[in-house]
Amino acid sequence: MSEIAARTRRRVDRRLMPFILLLYVVSFLDRVNVSSAGLQMTRELHFSDSVFGLGGGIFFIGYFLLEIPGSMLAELWSARKWIARILISWGFVASLTGFIHTSGEFYAARFLLGIAEAGFVPGVLVYLSHWYRSGDRAKAMALFFAGIPAAQVVGGPMAAVLLKIQWLGLGGWRWLLILEGLPALLLGIATLFYLTEHPKDAKWLAPEEREWLTAELAAEQAAKPHLKEGWRPALSALADPRVLLLSAILFLGLNSNYGVGLWLPKMVQRFSKFDVSTVSLIATIPSLCSLPAMFLTGLHSDKTGERIWHTAIPRFLSAAALVVCFFSASRGELWLSVTMLSIATIGFYSSHPGFWPLPNAFLGGAAAAASLGMVNSFGNLGGFLGPYMLGLFSDRTGSFGPGLLYLAGCSLISGLLVLRLLKLWQLPRP
């Protein structure tokens, strides 16, 4: 690798990734903090497991509706401005969730939060494709998606503190939701000033670094189909069977991911006699374990240029761990269950670095942006179904066991569909 290439990559990493990671930490924190709030909220508002599961998952219905248009706006208009708009609007709605009193208000707040946040993930992925070559993207994806477990690692101790407070007659779970929405508002404003739209505009890069990165990215784009800009060619890419298969893979995978993520604190609470603050801290263990595994998977995927097995194997690992958790949970074995949920979580998050570079492997420009939106949009419907099904099974059977088997099956089938990609096309090596 040339000196200018190495120097440019380091500068881009240092400038962009810490800020992008912070944005996703805040994003995911505002999305899933309801799982910790639920330790008190369900009791105070008399919500059943089905009500809580539906409210937790309905976020993704609103998310689904605007995901594809949002991702295309990020490409055809401005990723930087679109990301800033999303941050400001979701921060406002996230804080308002702390004032709900009924199940209808809970559903409405979560639905609006999904609409407000729609387009954020594909918008960031579009933005990163403007800065990272295909051979560097798994590492960038690993750093970005590390925001998910990082948010849970940060959120657990925060929840443990905030759930104890009682201010102005409001319970701790309300302050948890209100206060954790505020950083998004501030970061939305900061985004407009901090992020640079394209390498050619980056005054923080030396002229020769701007020229090298711009030329490298342009050469990659020129080698891909569907590069004609505009809405029509982008929408035509959505019928590509590879895009449809990627959507199904993520849909099944996120059934398991969000099913475990939303219900983990409630599962720990049911298996133990700990107070809500201790439960919140224990619930951070799986995410803490997944962080190093996620980084190592991304680095190895970039080093080898292999994406398929780096996506499939973690899914199979998650499925196996959830099956073991089914037996340990039925016997009330807390620490074995937490261990298995930690292994499952490692699998969930370690699959992301290999998976998310796949759409850009065969599409570019607005077509790639639209495909990212569709994959994330349909995939995140799994974020609705997984939490709801786990709550439904819990109400019907009085146990999380059947729901864990459902999530294990989703993860297994997701991994098998990833292997199907090998027959649909031979992925170009970065």
Image (cartoon, helix red, strand yellow):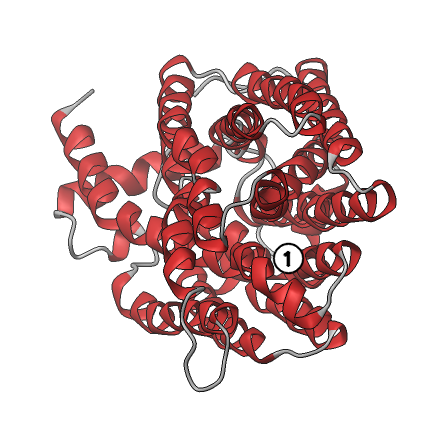
Query: Is 329 in front, or is 92?
Result: 329
In-image side of 374 versus 224 (left or right): right
Query: In the image as oriented, which residue stretches furthest toward the right?
Result: 396
In-image side of 78 versus 18 (left or right): right
Query: Is 25 in front, or is 69?
Result: 25
Q: Within the image, what quadrant is residue 326 found in?
A: top right
Q: Secondary structure at mark 1?
A: helix
Q: Given the image, on which type of amino acid does mark 1 rest?
A: Glu
Q: Residue at x 76, y 47 (%)?
A: 385
Question: Could you tell me residue 290's position as x and y percent?
Answer: 43, 30
Quadrant in which the C terminus appears: top left
For residue 303, say whether it is visible: yes
Q: Residue at x 37, y 52 (%)?
A: 157
Q: Within the image, what quadrant is residue 268 found in?
A: top right
Question: Could you tell me residue 294's position as x and y percent?
Answer: 42, 28
* In the image, residue 279 above or below residue 252: below
* In the image, residue 227 above or below residue 276: above
Q: Residue at x 80, y 42 (%)?
A: 398
Question: Could you tell me residue 285's position as x and y percent?
Answer: 43, 35
Query: In the image as oriented, which residue stretches furthest toward the bottom?
Result: 168
How many C-alpha atoms fall within 10 Å of the one at disc 1: few (<14), some, or many (≥20)?
A: many
Q: Residue at x 75, y 43 (%)?
A: 390
Question: Could you tell me residue 130's position as x and y percent?
Answer: 39, 46
* In the image, residue 391 above or below residue 329: below
> What residue sits right under mark 1 in the picture?
67
